[in-house]
Image (cartoon, rainbow, N blue to C red):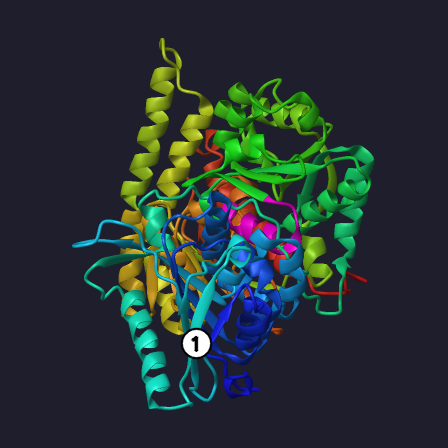
């Protein structure tokens, strides 16, 4: 169909015509582009024009709207949510598959549909504010439809895009580009005027995008609207057997920790528990707390695609905790650990009882600051779920006791060995590069030990754990590792092309970078918040290699990582397991993936070895890695 199928009528009015039914909706159904300038826009127009918008979407069409800033606050919130979701490419890909449900969704959930129209790229909206010689409102009302054959229908008149406009006495004049030269000129004039406004080339208007309006604090960010679509299923609708076992264990215990290897679906298991408890009317919503913007953003993506509950965020630049407290109980709050106490102090006891508390990387809940802030604050939650591949805190009995008492004991374990055996994580090869301490390294160790004993009998004795940490740091910073790594890299450069290289400091990372440059590898660093874009570039395959530190150890899912290089390794198994998990995830794009772990083993000993556990740390880790590297896939874990 084309616009030429429309009846040619020079004008419409609300007294004798149904403007929406007779003109707007049929024109949308035949267009691939709809441009609109309007003084007052509301989401109700989306509901009223749903049939035409669904047809526009099915044809791969797009709508662009310029309006005054006088929008309803809820409409603003919906638009902002849409632009926020648009930035997530994975979400956008999933949403494109469900555009055919736009019509049904918009009739029941108008605000949410408006948000997802923006997210899916179907709708762009900008706001216009008069400037220079004008100081009133942007009050124009005109529009242009364009079809696949470049025919145009333009209109102008009095109606705004609101429900009330079609209950007023309103009228429009219409111009058809194929009728004659005059009509064509009028249609083209409206098109060119819109483009001039859209591109901010009208000297008497200032046109702003929604993100620009956000930056200028014109609206309040929120992401609490429910999705109006059903997300597509791939026909498999399954979960892994161990996830079912974990869910059953938690439902029986009601609180406790799931100790599941990195990459085995802790997040999805937790969300399955949320849905099961909701089905049983045991809870109405959930609070998810975690540490680090990257991990919280990853949770947000999972929540968007795996639950229909409204989502509030209270971390980094997101400030929606108050909205959560004032909103519906049937919602999810995604919050940083450090912000949790502020919300809990205001959360009614009844709402705590009907919410599931999820603590990701639950070992972090045992830090002294969190223990002090949250002692006796979690008792109101009937259901408390902890997630971690390594819930035990090294050298911290008090922190471990807090986690067990306030979240719960470990109620289910699924180890790395089991995950590799069942084919959930991939097999890997272990490479141990040997080195010996330099004389400077040995001298630093002896000095640290002497300093420790010198203070042992003084007024301010040093805890032994602090000595161990200092000795570990000397080991992590030994430059004796660089030569064996250079030799290995020269012969195995391909292994490093999808690798994460863990270092202790940025200064040490600079030394490693010199080797990578000599090998011709395309790398970058990931140390602080200003490097976050590099993580995304690495995940998207734009970078071959990422030099990083412990910030990336927890919760980040990049399935294409093929190798890790451990210049910095802790004696604690926690950090090593987290880093190993970065490279063992199955890669759908590479079914035959086999990972590699490059490690550094110190082979010389010190005279003070009896009081220095660091002298055995490397050998202990090598033995563990060698055993794990021998595990072979033997069964499928899939459960339909």
In depth, the one of 160 and 305 nearer the eye is 160
Q: Which residues are magenta?
A: 295-310
Front residue of 549 and 221: 221
Q: Is residue 301 magenta?
A: yes
Give the side of residue 282 with respect to residue 597, left or right: right
**What quarter of the picture does the N terminus occupy?**
bottom right
Label 1 CA crowd tier, 10 Å (few <14, some 14–19, many 20+): many
Q: Would you place residue 8 above or below residue 502 in this image?
A: below
In the picture shown, does residue 319 fall above or below 242?
A: above
What residue is rendered at 44% in x and 44% in y?
A: 221
Indicate the position of residue 166 as horizontal and vertical percent values. 54, 59
Question: Residue at 43% across / 48% down in the picture?
Answer: 71
Residue that mark 1 sits on? 174
Comparing 341 with 186, the one in front is 186
Is 399 rendered above or below residue 59? above
**Dominant secondary structure (helix, strand or loop) of the stretch shown in magenta:** helix
Q: Is residue 630 magenta?
A: no
User: Vertically, is 410 above or below 168?
Assistant: above
Q: Position of residue 63 (x, y in %)?
A: 46, 69
Residue 527 at least partly seen: no
User: In the rendered image, which quarter is residue 91 located in?
Assistant: bottom right
Q: Quadrant of the C terminus?
A: bottom right
Could one spot residue 8 in this view of the protein?
yes
x then y, percent, for residue 206: 25, 56
Dot 1: what SS?
strand
Q: Position of residue 616 (x, y in %)?
A: 51, 41
Q: Is residue 163 left or right of residue 475?
A: right
């Amino acid at each position: 169909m084309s616009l030429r199928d429309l009846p040619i009528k020079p004008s419409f009015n609300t007294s004798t015509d149904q403007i929406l039914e007779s003109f707007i909706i049929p024109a949308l159904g035949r267009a691939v582009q709809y441009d609109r300038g309007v003084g007052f826009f509301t989401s109700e127009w989306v509901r009223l024009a749903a049939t035409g918008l669904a047809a526009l979407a099915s044809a791969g069409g797009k709508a662009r709207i310029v309006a005054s800033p006088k929008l309803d606050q809820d409409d603003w919130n919906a638009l902002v949510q849409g632009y926020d979701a648009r930035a997530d490419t994975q979400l956008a890909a999933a949403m494109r598959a469900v555009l055919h449900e736009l019509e049904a969704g918009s009739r029941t959930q108008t605000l949410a549909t408006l948000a997802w129209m923006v997210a899916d790229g179907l709708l762009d909206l900008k706001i216009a504010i008069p400037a220079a010689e004008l100081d009133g409102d942007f009050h124009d009302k005109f529009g242009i439809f364009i079809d696949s054959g470049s025919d145009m229908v333009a209109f102008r008149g009095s109606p705004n895009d609101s429900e009330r406009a079609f209950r007023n006495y309103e009228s429009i004049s219409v111009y058809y580009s194929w009728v004659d030269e005059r009509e064509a000129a009028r249609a083209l004039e409206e098109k060119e005027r819109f483009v001039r406004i859209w591109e901010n080339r009208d000297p008497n208007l200032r046109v702003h995008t929604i993100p620009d309006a956000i930056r200028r604090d014109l609206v309040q960010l929120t992401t609490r609207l429910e999705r109006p679509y059903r997300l597509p299923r791939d026909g498999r609708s399954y979960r892994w057997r161990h996830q079912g076992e974990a869910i059953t264990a938690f439902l029986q215990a009601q609180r406790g920790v799931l100790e599941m290897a990195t990459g085995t679906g802790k997040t999805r298991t937790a969300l399955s528990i949320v849905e099961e408890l909701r089905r049983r009317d045991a809870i109405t919503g959930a609070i998810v707390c975690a540490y680090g913007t990257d991990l919280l953003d990853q949770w947000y993506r999972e929540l968007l695609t795996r639950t229909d509950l409204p989502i509030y965020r209270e971390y980094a630049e997101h400030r929606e905790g108050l909205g959560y407290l004032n909103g519906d109980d049937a919602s999810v709050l995604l919050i940083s650990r450090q912000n949790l106490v502020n919300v809990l102090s205001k959360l009614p006891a009844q709402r705590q009882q009907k919410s599931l508390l999820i603590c990701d990387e639950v070992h972090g809940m045992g830090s002294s600051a969190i223990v002090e802030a949250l002692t006796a604050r979690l008792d109101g939650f009937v259901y408390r779920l902890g997630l971690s591949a390594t819930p035990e805190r090294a050298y911290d009995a008090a922190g471990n006791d807090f986690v067990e008492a306030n979240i719960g004991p470990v109620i289910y374990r699924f180890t790395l060995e089991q995950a590799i055996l069942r084919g959930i994580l991939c097999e890997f090869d272990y490479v141990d590069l040997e080195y010996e301490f330099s004389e400077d390294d040995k001298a630093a160790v002896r000095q640290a030990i002497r300093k420790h004993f010198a203070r042992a009998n003084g007024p301010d004795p040093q805890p032994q754990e602090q000595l161990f940490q200092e000795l570990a740091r000397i080991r992590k910073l030994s430059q004796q590792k660089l030569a064996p790594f250079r030799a290995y890299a020269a012969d195995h450069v391909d292994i490093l092309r999808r690798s994460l290289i863990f270092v202790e400091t940025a200064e040490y990372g600079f030394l490693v970078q010199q080797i990578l440059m000599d090998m011709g590898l395309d790398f970058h660093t990931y140390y602080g918040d200003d490097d976050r874009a590099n993580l995304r570039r690495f995940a998207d395959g734009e970078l071959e290699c990422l030099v990083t530190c412990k910030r990336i150890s927890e919760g980040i899912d990049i399935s294409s990582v093929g190798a890790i290089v451990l210049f910095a390794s802790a004696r604690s198994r926690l950090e090593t397991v987290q880093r190993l998990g970065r490279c063992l995830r199955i890669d759908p794009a590479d079914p035959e993936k086999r990972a590699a772990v490059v490690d550094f083993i110190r082979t010389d000993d010190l005279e003070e070895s009896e009081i220095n556990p660091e002298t055995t740390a490397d050998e202990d880790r090598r033995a563990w890695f060698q055993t794990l590297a021998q595990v072979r896939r033997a069964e499928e874990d899939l459960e339909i």
